[in-house]
Image (spheres, rainbow, N blue to C red):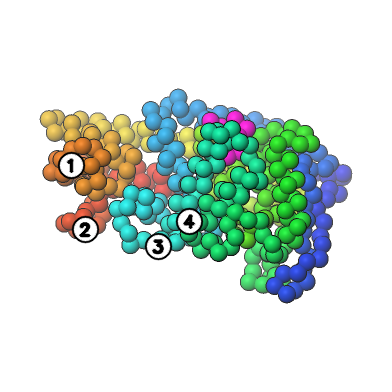
Amino acid sequence: MSEEQKGRKTGHSVPSIAAGSTVQAFVPYPLPPQPPLNIEQIGLERIERANRSLGRIDGLTTILPDTSLFLFFYVRKEAILSSQIEGTQSSLEQLLLFESQELTSLPIDEIQEVSNYVRALYHGLEQIRGQGLPLSLRLIRDIHRILLAGTRGQNKDPGQFRRVQNWVGGGHPSLAAFIPPPPLESVAGMQQLESFLHDRPERTPPLIKAGLMHVQLETLHPFLDGNGRLGRLLIPLLLCSEKVLDEPTLYLSLYFKTHRQAYYQHLQRVRTEGDWEGWLGFFLDGVADTADKAVEAAKSILTLFESDRESIRSLGGTASSALRLHDHIQKKPIASVANAATQTGLSVPTVGSAFHRLQKLGIVHEMTGKKRGRLFAYASLLAILNEGI
């Protein structure tokens, strides 16, 4: 870091009142950073690697026969991981059961939170692509409203910027890891962030913009709840808005979760030392690592499907119905006989027999131990999807 950058200030402290106590709240300066970023210090190789990896993940459409299938599961995996960072214990299996209404005896609050993440992402994507709207404060508030609907945060002003001083970490402001800006300064900061996202006062490369946006939103902490989930969700939405990605296929929650301590240290060093370059290096490494793993997961899924279809074809005359059922469980890896029959158009006895054959081949296993209302899981597919959860 140059001498000029060592003296870089990313914000200033102001007095505020939180829970009846006087605290020093941090107000970040508008983006982009001043003095300007030192790209060489971030590392040109890092930037190039991240862009190459993004190109690979965006090119998944060239190797996947059904991109929507991969996206369906990948979005849900991200929703699980992002909510786990906030303390939920929900699993991918629970989310799939909740969405298919196969079981009702689930921790509804936590599952609803995860399901909302999926809804919020697709709402944002529809507004950006379908309606041609920019990533704006109005859209951010709409996304936040969907995130908190019917969850433990539903009484914390969903979709509304906070009107009280908050803090991050600790049960009392005196124990906080960080004090965000007071409400008025936070709203002003969000307005400045919107200008930055719209390339005012200057154009910023999309990946760098995404990294800067994430820290600024975490620092402003503009809502009473859900700031972390929102900040992670906005990364793929911004990259879609900037037309870097055709589909929202980049999700960093697993990287942030795996490197949790480094993640928080980098955020804090931006605030205390102005070390934007250190954060962006960490962020770009996460982009490359995450994108590469997503491509490998897609290839593993393709290999699994083809291998299992070869096994099913060996059944001879009974292979036809088993192959149709296999097509179904690719999309619904946890399924009942009744729902599979409805979705495939096969009779209940035919589906039951097909599940039995797939079970003998080791492709599915029965997960309830019951004679009625049984559920079958496509275990190998779930194992790939569950990596890191």
Q: Using residue 55 as the reference point, say whether residue 209 is left or right of it.
A: right
4 or 1: tag closer to the N-terminus: 4
Of the two numbered discs 4 and 3 on the same chain, state the one appearing first in sequence: 3
For the residue carrying disc 1, how many other residues have a C-alpha within 10 Å: few (<14), some (14-19), or many (20+)?
A: many
Q: Residue at x 70, y 72 (%)?
A: 19
Q: Disc 2 residue type?
A: Gly
**How far across and down, in percent of the image, does residue 98 sit?**
36, 53
Rendered residue at 73%/59% (across/down): 183
Question: What is the CA distance from the residue labelled 3 to the residue labelled 1?
Answer: 30 Å
* Sequence-first tag of 3 and 1: 3
| Residue type indicated by callout 1 | Val
The residue pinned by badge 2 equals 369
The residue shown at (65%, 30%) is 48
* Residue type beneath disc 4: Glu
> Would you place residue 104 above or below residue 247 in this image?
below
First along the sequence among labels 4 and 2: 4
Identify the secondary structure beneath mark 4: helix
CA distance separating discs 2 and 3: 21 Å
Contact, mark 4 vs mark 3 (Cβ under 8 Å): no
Q: Which residues are magenta?
A: 237-246
Q: Quadrant of the N terminus?
A: top right
Q: Which residue corresponds to mark 1?
A: 351
Foreground tag (4 vs 1):
4
Asked if residue 222 is among those painted magenta in the image, a careful observer would answer no
In this figure, which residue is indicated by the disc labeled 3? Answer: 107
Look at the numbered disc 2 and give the secondary structure of its residue.
Answer: loop
Q: Please say if 288 is above or below 119.
A: above
Q: Count residues near mark 2 (Cα–Cα under 10 Å), then give few for <14, some for 14-19, many for 20+.
A: few
Asked whether, in this view, residue 310 is left or right of residue 18, the answer is left
Picture quadrant where residue 282 is located: top right
The residue under label 3 is which amino acid type? Pro
